[in-house]
Image: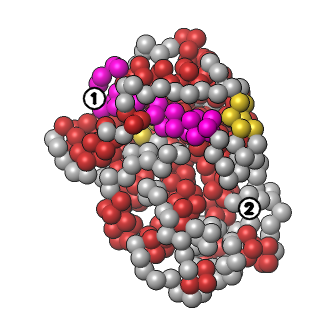
Amino acid sequence: MAFRHPGVVVSGSQLKAVRAHVAAGQEPWKSAFAAMRVSRYASLGYRPAPAAVVACPPNSGPPACLAEREDAVAAYTQALLWQLTGKPAHAAKAVEIMDAWSAVVKKHTEGNADLQTAWAGSSWARAADLVHATYPQWGGPAVQRFKWMLRKAYLPAVTAKVPDYNGNWELAMTDAAMSMSVFLEDRTVFEAALRRYRDRVPAYFYLASDGDLPKAPAAGTIDTADELGTYWFGQRKYVDGLGQETCRNFMHVGYSLAATAHIAETAWHQGIDLYTEEADRLTAALEFHARYQLGEAPPGWLCGGKVERTMGPDVEVALNHLGNRMHRELPYTEKLAARQRPAGTDDLFVAWETLTHAGNPGTTGDRGEDGDA
């Protein structure tokens, strides 16, 4: 299989469509583009703050952790601006940010290292793939150094096995691994990410066809009814669309929905249809959470009758495929997406997806030629 570039979450034909929508002043792309343009990440005066060691303990935000995530989002933002405006200054700014980090960072440490590398690594790979595919001024030793950075300071963390952690970790890690594998053109990492997706997604989002209990995380130690109930934050009644972290909060379910869609979207651009494999599961999960995020009162059996409606800008990519490519009906998700537009960034690993994916199926040429793996 030959890798296609750009092909990490967003494709060349999708970007061409966005340029046309923005030039014509059409919504929601006009407002989404305007929101991106005025963000601090879009400034040509943006200055990265690289660190040699990014130490991220749980439940804390040391400066280097915040800087790394924000710098990666900034690099992706500048790469998008280069694609949509044609102004080389934005490509040069993305390169400046990426080069600054590849010259300095060596490792990630502390309890949140795997998740930190997942969030930042996803954005780095998106930025690098866009710039490298379209800006020949970034090449040679600089690109090789950036690839070396991903291999040494990111890939070991995002390919680690953490099956007993909350599922948003492995989904974000798989998003990063998949994204990096395309930029690096590493077939081994790509295929491992496919396998991990196929294991973790069914263990995170429940369907009645799974049986009376949710699927246990692959290679983990959680498998009895009591253990699964505790792992699912005390939820003992399982219904279509429920997520492993639904009764924790919708923020973490949103992370998982976004990461799942990023993985499937990147695979789609590389010729592999992960969406169809889990279309029923993903549709159910989106609709289940969107209805309560929109304000519907939860029943007493769901999380004790209380849910935390904290979902971020996480539904555009999945909605675009299921609704625009597969023509499925997702009324609650459509309403939630409309309410959130123009979706910006969560400052972690989701950025500008109204702009890139709202009503944007791309062309059949986005699919690779070699079929499923």
Q: Where is residue 81 drawn, in percent x and y?
A: 34, 31
On residue 85, the disc is 1
The residue drawn where x is 25% and y is 51% is: 28
Give above or below for 104 relative to 331.
above
The residue drawn where x is 61% and y is 73% is: 247
Q: Which of pointers 2 and 1 indicates the residue nearer the eye? A: 1
Looking at the rendering, the stretch of residues picked out in magenta corresponds to: 63-89
Mark 2: secondary structure: loop
The residue drawn where x is 58% and y is 60% is: 252
Mark 1: secondary structure: helix
Badge 1 amino acid: Thr
Q: Where is residue 349 drawn, in percent x and y?
A: 52, 45
Give above or below for 3 relative to 242.
above
Residue 308 falls inside the magenta stretch: no
Query: For this rendering, which residue is in front, 22 or 348?
Result: 348
Q: In which quarter of the view is residue 318 placed?
A: bottom left
Residue on which the image places disc 2:
217
Residue lying at the far right in this picture: please name it. Answer: 221
